Image (cartoon, rainbow, N blue to C red):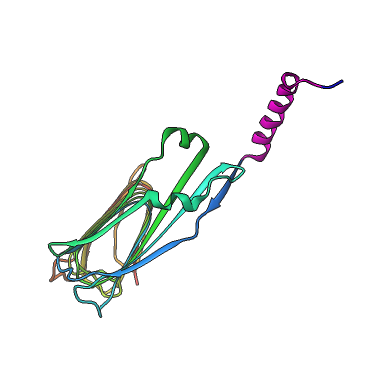
Amino acid sequence: MKMTVAAKLPTIGALTLALVVFSGCIRRTSDPVVEETDFWPVNQKISVSNPIGKVTVSGDTARIFNPHVRVEKRVQTYSLLGLANPDKYQSAIEIHQGVKDGELQIAVNLQRLPFLERLFVKVSPRVDFVLDAPVALPADLDVNVGAIEISNMVGNMNAAVNVGDMKIASTLGIFGTQNVEVNIGALDMRLPAEMPIRYDLETNIGKIESAGFDARIERRLLGARTTGVSGMTITESYVKGRVNIGNITFLGE
């Protein structure tokens, strides 16, 4: 006996449902798109705002007013049977870079997908910046989800991570004021033990570990704080670190 189309519909529906349930979503990753650029003249500061990814800034004594920027962006998609092509969504990541009045401005804009498309595909972009910059150039860095890594930047610095980790290291010392904040994550600072510096580090929920500096840690019910001066400070050398939820490591090497 032949089955009518109407009779076959429940079977087709059941098979489709089973396919959805048992196959699940498949992740696909796009090929990375890399761009490298030198900017000139940058004699005021660097400003970077990145919603998701990593920002790495390294001080280079050979550079004067000409930071080098490497950008790598990629996209991951999660879709039924992996049907969504991640390369298609590269254009949804807009990167704006330019010099204005001596300031290098870098920002990322993530375009929002149409509602119906968001029902069938999840798009997860990532943008990583690697900057080689003059060592004394001030910088403002902001990452929503990801990480910040700073090496041998001795001047004024403001850096913030909402969710993620931050690492700061300098074999050259610090000769300015550096304010760093992490909402949820960890802060790791490694500086020369013989460097004269004022410091003020605090975590609301977490602990502070220190070695190499004569740092006295005030432990609280949920958090901790340490403030003090290491050596004889002649220049304006000051680091202030705040972590809302997470730990702080403060090492003199």
Q: Which secondary structure type mostly characterizes the magenta part of the structure?
A: helix
Relative to 62, say whether 215 is above or below. above
Relative to 66, say whether 201 is above or below. above
Q: Position of residue 173 (x, y in %)?
A: 25, 72
Q: Relative to 59, is 75 on the left or the right?
A: right
Q: Nearer the viewer, residue 205 or 90?
A: 90
Q: Position of residue 142 (x, y in %)?
A: 29, 53
Q: Nearer the viewer, residue 210 or 62?
A: 62
Q: Relative to 219, is 104 on the left or the right?
A: left
Image quarter (top left, top right, bottom left or bottom right) of the N terminus:
top right
Relative to 7, say whether 183 is above or below. below
Image quarter (top left, top right, bottom left or bottom right) of the C terminus:
bottom left
Q: Position of residue 59 (x, y in %)?
A: 28, 72
Residue at position x 29%, y 65% from top?
214
Q: Which residues are magenta?
A: 3-24
Q: Position of residue 76 (x, y in %)?
A: 50, 50
Relative to 2, say whether 218 is above or below. below
Residue at position x 33%, y 52% from top?
94
The answer to whether residue 135 of the structure is visible from this angle is: yes
Q: Is residue 193 magenta?
A: no
Q: Nearer the viewer, residue 35 or 48?
A: 35
Q: Is residue 5 magenta?
A: yes
Q: Relative to 237, is 113 on the left or the right?
A: right
